[in-house]
Amino acid sequence: MSRKELRDRAKVLAKEHGYLQYMIERYLVLWGEQETLQFLEACEKPVKTSIRINTLKADQEVVIERMRRKKIILDRVPWLESGFYGDFADTSTPGAFLEHMLGFYYVQGVPSMTTVQVLDPQLEETVFDLAAAPGGKTTHIAQQMQNTGRVIAIEQDRQRLNSLESNILRCGVTNAIVYRGDAKKIQALNIQPDKILLDAPCSGEGLIPLDPTRKTSKTMADVHYCATRENEMLNAAISVLAPEGTIVYSTCSIAPEENEYIVDDILKRHPELKIVPIPLEFGSPGYTEPFGVHLNESLRLARRFLPHQDGTEGFFICKMKKEAA
Ligand code: SAM
């Protein structure tokens, strides 16, 4: 397809599906026509609701039975320890049940739950959650650590701190310290965590199935703005990570500029860092040649989740380990 043909085709598809034209042009270059159409169709379908049963507050079987009595059947997500699909469509929103208010579960997307399982926090560790509000992953990390060790939950936005704090309280988390600040300046804390999660503030391009306004709300300049911030945050994170420590970088964006490009740049600047495999059948490998740009081959070990392939929102997860000092 010539550049002009591509632009013309993108213009038609953008009009039909309600997107900004530049986005469709990028999908056509990345995936070709057939996959682009599959993606656009999948983005019109609802994503299955999923929850994480919070074992800090309740036994899994007890929650499954309580919800069954309320006609909500929970189906285990095969690779997740505490993740379940639940059909809440005929009742009310999942957040309106007493069990939710009691902190027995957290309404959370499957890729988000997968991120913390990939981080694999252990008992008694020190873990940084660098972009923490509203706390889905902070509370999950605390759950995995059975409220031992310490989770330092960093959030810059004062307003969003309220939701973070209330979720920590609701979920019975007692090992988290909430710190309001800029994750780009975490060196000032003078702590070397064993593990870091950077679930970065991103352009949210993966959230189109959940939020159709994203089809028209962001320009390429927004994507570049987010990419610069993501790069700075990841650099700061790596500088404080303990030797042999693990870092997981995730976004709910599908733009390679916010995912593979960021990690590729970080690997060039930090030879002490290696990508480690994520042993999951779910998702697909990270890109190594998006838009014809050759990136580090090990980016294949990262995982991408896409609406048309995985039935989820779009998401990216990359796990890296720092060498011994
Ligand atoms: N991890 C959260 C969860 O699972 O509930 C979602 C995090 S959301 C994708 C990104 C968060 O990063 C937002 O709450 C945003 O306010 C915060 N943020 C943005 N810039 C930041 C910075 N420089 N330092 C710390 N937090 C920041």
Image (cartoon, helix red, strand yellow):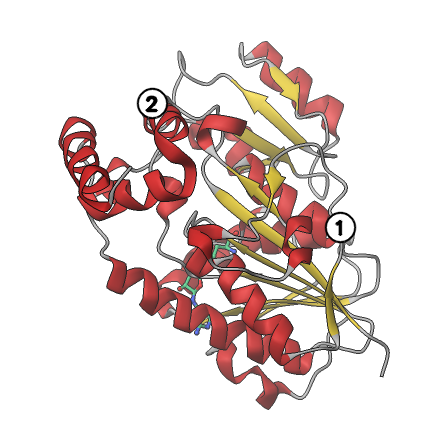
- From the viewer's perspective, is residue 69 above or below residue 219? above
**Is 241 in front, or is 265?**
265
**Is 190 in front, or is 26?**
26
Picture quarter with the C terminus: bottom right
Quarter-of-image position of residue 95: top left
Where does residue 273 sit, x and y in percent of width and height?
Answer: 72, 72
Specify the amino acid type for callout 2.
Answer: Glu
Where does residue 172 sit, x and y in percent of width and height?
Answer: 64, 50
Q: Residue at x 49, y 16 (%)?
A: 87
- From the viewer's perspective, is residue 237 above or below residue 106? below
Is residue 20 something that shows in the picture?
no
Q: Left of 137 or right of it: where is 291? A: left
Q: Left of 265 or right of it: where is 57? A: right
Identify the element where label 1 is drawn: loop
Picture quarter with the N terminus: top left
Q: Left of 281 or right of it: where is 170? A: left
Say which label, 1 or 2, has the lower sequence index: 2
Q: Residue at x 48, y 35 (%)?
A: 306
What residue sits right under mark 1 in the picture? 277
Query: What whole-number distance in Å separates the C-alpha atoms at marks 1 and 2?
Result: 31 Å
Disc number placed over residue 41 in the picture, else none: 2
